[in-house]
Each structure stands twice: as C-alpha cells, then as structure tokens.
Amino acid sequence: MSLLDKYLPRKDFESYEDFYKNYAVSIPESFNFAYDVVEELATKKPDSRALQWCDEKGAEAAFTFAQMNNLSNKAANVLRDAGIGKGDPVMLILKRRWEYWPVLLALHKLGAIAIPATHLLTTKDIVYRCNAADIKGIICVDDSELMSRIDEAEEKINLKLGYKAFARSVHIKKDDNPAPSSAWIDFKPIMDNASDNFQKPAVVNSNDDIMLLYFTSGTTGMPKMVRHNFEYPLGHIATARFWHQVVPEGLHLTVADTGWAKAAWGCIYGQWLCEAGIFIFDYDRFIPPAMLEIISKYRLTSFCAPPTIYRFFIREDLKKYDFSALKHCSVAGEPLNPEIFDRFLEGTGIKLRECYGQTELTVSLCTWPWLEPKPGSMGKPAPGYDIDLLREDGTSCTMGEEGQIALRTDKRKPYGMFGGYYRDDALTASVWSDNIYYTGDVAWKDEDGYYWFVGRNDDVIKSSGYRIGPFEVESALMEHAAVLECAITGVPDPDRGTAVKATVVLAKGYSASDELKVELQEHVKKTTAPYKYPRIVEFVSELPKTISGKIRRVEIRGEDTKQ
C-alpha cells in the first residue's frame, strides 16, 4: 500500500471526464505534512531518496527521507529553543539552498507560519513584509548584502523575537536577554549539536490554521498576502501525479526559487506525497547547456519550467543530450509559444503540457494526461474547479468570446484554494464574493472545451472597438529572430482610443532602426490579424519586471501616461 492510498481512494481514471467528475481527496483531521507524510516515509522507506541537490560549482548533497526527517527534528529543536512556536510567522529567504527543506518542515512541526521570500527583496520590501505580517524571525542565506539589508530594515520593523539566521548562522535575541541586532552567530554547530529527537507538541495545528503566507509578485500593485492552511499540500496531489506525472522513486525538477509559490507546487508537497524524489539545481545565473547537462547527468524523470527556459533550450542542439530517462515535461508561468512546443517535441520527442493557476490557487486548468496538447492552450479545468468566463456584467460568455476567468465556489471550495488575503477582508471581498472568485485574467474557450489565455484584465487593450490580448501580439513578435523580449501595452490615442505599443529588447546582433520597426510591424500583420499590429515600437535595453521576473506592463503604461 502506497502512502498516496491514504489520501487518494482512486488513482486511475479512464478519461478526462472520469477524472474531473470522480477525483476526490480524503482529508484527515489535523493533517500536518511534516508528520503525516515525511515522518511516515522516514519510517516506511527510510533509505529512499527524498532530495538530490547540486549547485553550479559542482557541490552535491543527497538526503533520504530518514535523513530529512532527522534534520527537520534538529531544526525544530533549534527554532523552539529560540522561542518560535505555534502561529509565529517566520520569513525564509533561502534561495535554492537545501537547508530550506528541513527548516520549512521544522516550522510545520511547530505549527508556525512559514513565509517564503526571494533574496531579491530590497530593504523597503523587507520592512513592508515584516510589518504587514508581524514577522517574528527571518532565516536567510549566507549573503552579506542580504543580511545588510535585513539589518537596515530592522531599524524600522519589530522582530518580536529578533530571530535572524542563515544557512550556517543564527542570531537569537530573546525578549529577556537581548543581543546586539548586528550580531550573527554561527548556526552550523547549533544545528549539529541539536538532538534529532523532537518532542511533538501536544497541539500542533488544526486544518484551518495558517501554514503558509505567500506575498504575490505585485505586477499591478503592492504585494498581497495569500493565506494557505495545513490542508494545502493535499491540493497538490493532482499537480504532481496528473500534471508533472511524477513516479515513485523517480526524480523531479521544477525550476523555481523557494521564495515563490511555484516551489510549493513542484518542489515538495505533491512530489513527496507521490513518493518521488526532488531534484534541486542551485544556480545564480541560468546557462542553458548547464541545465540540460543536469537533466541528462542525473537522469531526471520529469521536469517543469517556465516558457523562457524552454525558449533557450530550443536554441541548443537537444539531440546531443541523453533524455532517455525523461518522460514528462511541463510548463507554466505564461502561455507557451507554439514554436517552442514544436521544436522541443522535435528535439526530445516530449509534448509539453501547460497549466494555469495562481498563488491563490493550485492547478486550475491543465493539459491533463488524457488530453492532446494544443500549443498555447491552458487545457481544461481541474477537478473541483467550477470555472466560468464572465463578461463585465457578470453573465457567462459564449464559445470563442473573451471573458474573465472566474471560479464558482458555491458547491465546494477546491482542494488547496487560499483562505483569503491575510488581515485584509476588504481585499478578499473585492475578488471573492457571492461564491465567485475573480482571477483578474482573461481567456476564451474553444469548441473542444480548451481554454486560451489572453492576458490580465488590466492588460487587455481596447483599440478601435477591438479587444486585443497582449500575449498574442507578443507571441508573434517573439517568432522574429531580432526579438529577445517584448511587452505589448496600450497608449492613449485620439483616433483609436488606445493604440498598440510594443516595447522590445533586441537579440544580440541586431540594432534599433526605423527599418527594423517596419519589419516587425509587417511580421505581426502577417502572423496575426492586421488590426493587432503595434503602431508604436520602442526599443529598450531591458523591461521593467517584478522581483519574480514577471513583466510590469503597468509600469510601462505609467511612463507612457507621464509622457
């Protein structure tokens, strides 16, 4: 009997329709992933590989489930001695360091609230997050610049326990015995000397307690605090088994920094529930051949990354790598350009499977195993996701008509859906009311029931009576060899109301010119409908992005409005 049998009464389905109708998860009371999954696997299969890690410099580390459980017990003892307990919010800024996993599990064992964050946070970002969530401790990577920013932020925040740590160091400042805020104490001997026998608290958590807080990337405003409870990991069984298609004893890599929810999707919960090993490649600079070599060398069985990664992959000679162990590849983060799909299939024999979701949700739409992929399509709804496309007046769209993706929750809330925005009922109500959750994303549905992403509601351009989604135009531009990156926005126009603008970063070997502008415009006219071509083309050295790497079209629009 596999571990998954406890939570998934039925694991095999005859068709997508069967899957959508009959998929169900058994949720026990007071579920805690660290105890009910990791500790059980440590007992059931102690020597099985849980985590394989390597960095770009050649360092390696591997951990069995028994080792991971013991390390998390050590970390839990250290954290408890520091004063961290049930309900205490602790920020984790650990990049792709392997220490993230035992520390995260330790917080789960304590019933504390983990707040993963990116190392790219500025001092201002750290202050905002600490004050918004009343963060009691910060654990970060061994990075002098990052620690300096935390020290600067500490002057404007209230770390109630003054707990600061990084991969090999820890600073503990208890209320009754304060230490200088600038002190950093070596964590490695504390961790090494801690007992791996952790006494489980009498009361750890209920299912509704907060387990994770994720700050959104802030593409249109200040980051929101997304609240997930202790049931959340069970929502990612579908992610791992039916999208990533991981296998027991296999090795799965999702390319994601631990500061973002994508790591929760692909780097721990669903994968371990399916008894698959996780692979982590710790790098600062993405080098396509290096990652392709990792896939080949470690014989990964499944892989997931954003389209940008695959865009660079297809520029390499894929035939020279050994992909014989690789069975499934998936993609998310933005819609997939059909050219990438075709060339990756040609080079590897693998069809990329797309999905759509948000930090607030789990996999919501997906090209499930029973569906033939349509490049650029998000696929069909996940079980439990009653999805509709709504017009501005709240009525449902017809086939082929663009509308906002909305989720109806009157029958039941999907597995893993967030519980609202932390400490902001008004913001929650603005997107989730009358049992309808509005995603803010626009899509349309074809005659086969597949959904196609158009763009964020705020990004859709209305020009001369037409609605133009930025992705379709961006996708057309990306097919041109001169374009490395681009963003499509609308600018005020006296005749059309709004004109389409392309902000373009050129590839190496190309220079900005009026001739190239015309060439790009003509290319878009031929690739999409003529009315969608960018009447304005601006060449720039880089695009404004969030700290998660998403393009901030709102910033481009803001600059155009000023001008």
Image (tube, helix red, strand yellow):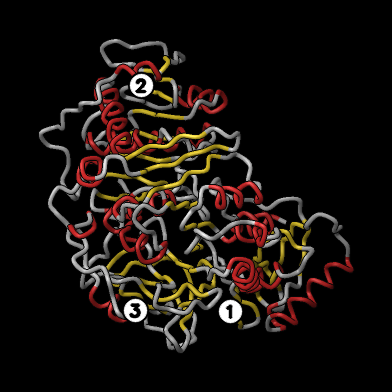
- Residue 17, labelled with which disc? none
Q: CA distance from mark 3 to mark 1?
A: 32 Å
Tell me if 510 is positioned left or right of 203 in this view.
right
Residue closest to the eye, 241 or 90: 241
Residue 27: % across, % down: 17, 57
Q: Give the residue type at disc 1.
A: Arg
Q: Give the residue type at disc 3.
A: Tyr
Image height of 182 relative to 58, above or below: above
- Residue 467, labelled with which disc? 1
Q: Are marks 1 and 2 in contact (CB under 8 Å)?
A: no
Give whichever of discs 1 and 2 has the lower sequence position.
2
- Residue at x-position 20% and y-position 46%: 36
- Residue at x-position 68% and y-position 66%: 491
Residue 10 visible in the shown view:
yes
Give whichever of discs 3 and 1 has the lower sequence position.
3
Q: Secondary structure at mark 2?
A: loop
* Residue indicated by mark 2: 162
Give whichever of discs 3 and 2 has the lower sequence position.
3
